[in-house]
Amino acid sequence: MKNNDLTNTLLENTRQETAPTQKAKQERRSFLGYQIKDIVFLAIMSAVVLVTSSFMPLLLHIPVFGIIQIGLGLQFSMFPAIGLAKVRKPLSLVFMSVCSGVVLLFMNTVMFLCLLVCALIAEGVTLLIFKSYERDAACFLACAVYFPLSLPFLYVWYQIMGGTVLAYINSVWWVTALMSVAVVALCCLGSYLGVRISRELKKSGVMKK
């Protein structure tokens, strides 16, 4: 009996020593609450957004307000929604925005800053309402309003810079209004699909929490 008691005591001491060690390793592998697997997953989602948006230069030559958002709205709402539904941590959308927009930093700095500000606003409004991303509705809202927020920013930009797009806005204003509504609807659809896809992936065990 004494041997058994001694063995149990040694095992208990080993567990107590191992637990802090594992916790310390976990903390070393995290940054601001993000584990390496979180950062990798968000980076992968950002890369998918970039790959599926590679045709964007073709849209730049079409002088219709909102045409870029129509072409990229699904990607910029669905894949960030999947990433946010998986990680569910503040600034996840901002991180994906930086990763997916970094290629624009030297090509179109204004668009990069626009996406960054839109992500900050979308996250701020969402966290103000839901406090966290624990609910799917929070993930949906953040990604649904993220990309459409670029519309007012670009509208102001065109008003300042002028050009053929501004002339089209002023001459055919109803098309601008319809395009804006279409962008919002498309991004809501993409965000909804992203949340649903993440649910199905979790149910099947492909994407764990």
Image (tube, helix red, strand yellow):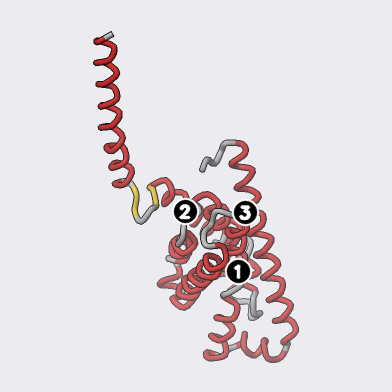
Rendered view: 47 above or below 207:
below
Mark 2 element type = helix
The residue sitting at 47% across, 56% down in the picture is 89
Q: Residues within 10 Å of mark 2 (few under 14, many from 20)?
A: many
The amino acid on which the numbered mark 1 sits, given as a three-letter code, is Val
Residue indicated by mark 2:
42
Q: Quadrant of the N terminus?
A: top left
**Label located before the other in sequence (1 or 3):** 1
> Are the two marked residues, 1 and 2, in contact with CB atoms closer than 8 angstroms?
no
* Mark 1 burial class by Cα count in 10 Å: few <14, some 14-19, many 20+: many
Give the image location of residue 72, x and y in percent.
60, 65
The CA span between labels 1 and 3 is 14 Å
The answer to whether 112 appears left or right of 75 in the picture is left
Can you give x and y, in whole percent of width and height, for residue 201 in the image? Answer: 60, 42
Q: Which mark is residue 145?
A: 1
Q: Residue at x 24, y 16 (%)?
A: 6
Residue 67, horizontal then vertical, whole percent: 65, 73
Question: Which numbered disc covers residue 21?
Answer: none
Whether the residues at callouts 2 and 3 have beta carbons within 8 Å, the answer is: no
